[in-house]
Amino acid sequence: MIYADNAATTGMTPHAVDAMVPFLAEQYGNPSSLYSFGQESKEALEDARARIAACLGADPREITFTSGGSEADNQAIVTGAAIGARKGKKHIISTAFEHHAVLHTLKALEKEGYEVTLLDVHKNGVVTPEQVAEAIREDTCLVTIMYANNEIGTIQPIKEIGAVCREKGVLFHTDAVQAAGHVHIDVKDQNIDMLSLSAHKFHGPRGIGVLYAKRGIMLRNLIYGGAQERGKRAGTENVAAIMGMAAALEESCSNIDVNAKHMTAMRDRLIEGLDKIPYAELNGDRERRLPGNVNFCFEGIEGESLLLLLDDKGICASSGSACTSGSLDPSHVLLAIGRPHEVAHGSLRLTIGEDITEDQIDYMIGAVDEVVTYLRNMSPFWRDLTVGKRVHMFAE
Ligand SMILES: *Cc1c(COP(=O)(O)O)cnc(C)c1O
């Protein structure tokens, strides 16, 4: 099997598993308990917090543990909204191609009287600092823009966008779930006020994440209860998962450069190979993208059938995001970069892992080529294109 769906989730490394095991079994003390058995868990927890902070250029007091990326996004956005409301500012800026954890939180806030501006995304999958500067108003309280897109892998000019927000005195949150552990992040240098990450996207466990919030930002609770996480996120801490996350983040951050070098080479080989298929186009900028992300549209194809046939060939791939598969709507990300509905349906996302080999890349190129040809030969839509009843959207 070739696992090429690392944007959906990743497998844990042995290092991350090893870091968890003691806290699942013998070291089960509750960090809130006063006896030393509990305090040992507390010490491990705080050590993990410090190590995670160090990976981001943050202070440990700025790190809050959450149940994952979705919760961190929700909490960051309602925090920005609540801070704004106190000053009578209820305008939020985001983009059309955010993850649903962001978009649906914004939808909920709209129902509570907030106004949301979703910036258009350029054809290459990038939003510019100029667009952000233009959209900021007197009553803007929050800008939330993702670091790297989960479908097309494009990386945003985060430092520059952060600088614009800082200059205008507007809070800046970034959903860095796809970026953390894959590209270098420094929250201070990059002018980031709040940042979300999730362990299972960098070979840590599922169900654990982090919200970084710059000192001075009073987080708004999503979950009320005990005094855990300085009272800002109640519930007995998942110490084992936190230990696994810290180990995975340290491991991936210390290997970013080596991993990126290998994966970028493999990614570019895959892009080059798939580019040879007629009437196919890469989605998102070729350079400004995550080292592991390849996303193509093929004319005359249904993404779903493509995935099933690739599964038969032992390839785990995706079309659109996991949340939208099963629905008939094409990906909102592909529509945001201007792909027409017919083409957006025929998309394929291959997100490779660090250990991918050249042979596996070549196998995938062959398999996709074969499956695309097979599906096109059966498609009435494709026949219309070939006989000239419809016009091609892509060059051959
Ligand atoms: C996966 C993902 C999320 C959600 O993270 P979970 O930990 O699964 O809740 C949010 N944003 C982006 C960009 C993601 O890729």
Image: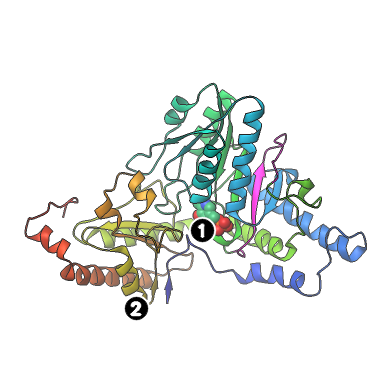
Picture quarter with the N terminus: bottom left
233 relative to 279 in the view: left or right: right
Q: Nearer the viewer, mark 1 or mark 2?
A: 2
**Label 1 residue near ligand 1, CB within 8 Å:** no
For mark 2, what is the residue? 312
**Which of the two residues, 159 or 76, is positioned nearer the viewer here?**
76
Residue 311 percent location from the top left of the image? 37, 75
**Is residue 149 located in the magenta-colored stretch of the structure?**
no
- Magenta part of the protein: which range? 204-221
Amino acid type, mark 1: Val
In the image, what residue occupies the spot 38% across and 49% down? Answer: 332
Residue 187 is at least partly visible in this image: no
127 relative to 206 in the view: left or right: left
Main SS, magenta region, reads loop
Residue 320 percent location from the top left of the image? 39, 58
Residue 177 percent location from the top left of the image? 54, 52
**Is residue 218 located in the magenta-colored stretch of the structure?**
yes
For mark 1, what is the residue? 258
Number of the label disc, if any, that sits on residue 353 = none
In the image, what residue occupies the spot 38% across and 59% down? Answer: 267
Picture quarter with the C terminus: bottom left
Q: Secondary structure at mark 1?
A: helix
Q: Secondary structure at mark 2?
A: helix
**Which of the two residues, 17 or 97, is positioned nearer the viewer here?**
97
Alpha carbon distance from label 1 to label 2: 32 Å
